[in-house]
Image (cartoon, rainbow, N blue to C red):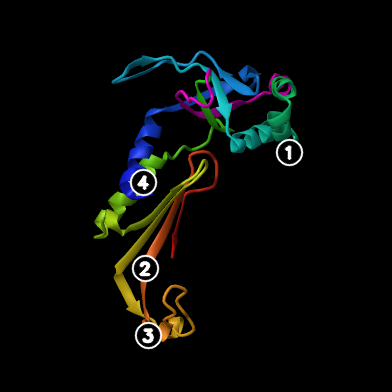
Amino acid sequence: ANIVDLIALLQAQHRQKVDVVLPLTSLRAVAGQIELAGLDPVMDENGVTDVAGAYRITPQAIGQLAGILDIPVKYLRKLADEHLSLFDTNVNEWAARGERKILVRALYGSDPAHPGTSGLVRAFLSDSYGMRDNLDFALAVLDGMREGGLGATNIRGADLSDDRLWLRVHAPEMAVAAPELTKDYRSPFTGAVGAENPLIHAGIIAENSETGGGALKVTPE
């Protein structure tokens, strides 16, 4: 996506976030979904919204839940796909024996493809998980770029998956001739060799995850 579309999407997701810390013993699966009860209603410009209800689970979140409950991941995912009653039994029985608290990260909202559901569980994490929201991360990257004399047009790529956000920043303003580094390079697009264009410019890849998909990283490119 371009950065304008990405920020709009992150703002929409930010408004729909539900984060709740709860005892593992209170976690309950019903028909392959997670029942989130007792949640505070969300108040915004649209009024008051009751966000309690049945939440679908992403494949990544099922894997995290399997780890928390010490259930084989492949087995739990197979139950989620093929045998919902056994999925519920396994989750509820093992959760009832838990002695810890967990952080559940979800997005509330209706989905025409899944009537009767209240949203989507994106992650089951430790209650001490340090949250870094994608919107805050993206705005911080933009602020840092502005301080460095770069603008939003320097972001050449933005990718968002269920578990990770990538921002690719190019800075042709910071270029240097590097004939030794580029001498064996041949462009896959034009066929030009490095000797014909020995300039290289700086870039960074910035990555973040809201759902336990890895640490925040900023690496040179």
Residue at position x 52%, y 38% in the image: 211
In the image, the segment drawn in magenta is 93-116
Q: Mark 1 points at which residue?
A: 74
The answer to the question of whether label 1 and label 4 lie on touching residues, with beta carbons closer than 8 A, is no
Asked if labels 3 and 1 touch by Cβ distance under 8 angstroms, the answer is: no
Which disc, if any, is residue 202?
2
First in sequence, mark 1 or 3: give its number: 1
Q: How far apart are marks 3 and 4 (CA)?
A: 36 Å
Helix, strand or loop at mark 4: helix
Any magenta on residue 154? Answer: no
> Which quarter of the picture shows residue 92?
top right
Identify residue type, mark 3. Answer: Glu
Between 209 and 57, the one lying in front of the other is 57
Q: Residues within 10 Å of mark 1 (few under 14, many from 20)?
A: few
Residue, disc 3? 196
- State the CA–CA distance, disc 3 to disc 2: 19 Å
Spatial CA distance of label 2 from label 1 is 42 Å
Q: In this image, 102 relative to 159: left or right?
A: right
Q: x, y (%) of residue 195?
A: 40, 86
Badge 4 density bin: few <14, some 14–19, many ≥20, Cα 10 Å: many
Dot in front, 3 or 4: 3
Q: Which of the two labelled residues, at mark 3 and mark 2, occupies the earlier sequence position?
A: 3
Q: Nearer the viewer, mark 1 or mark 3?
A: 3
Q: Mark 4 points at which residue?
A: 138
Mark 1 and mark 4 lie on one chain; the one further toward the N terminus is: 1
Helix or strand or loop: what does disc 3 sit on? helix
The reply, left or right, for residue 219 in relation to residue 88 is left
Instruction: Determine crowd level at label 2: few under 14, some 14-19, many 20+ residues with C-alpha closer than 10 A.
Output: some
Nearer the observer: mark 3 or 2; the answer is 3
* The C terminus sits in image quarter: bottom left
* Circle 3 Cα neighbour tier, 10 Å, few/some/many (<14 / 14–19 / ≥20): few
Q: Do the residues labelled 3 and 2 touch (CB within 8 Å)?
A: no
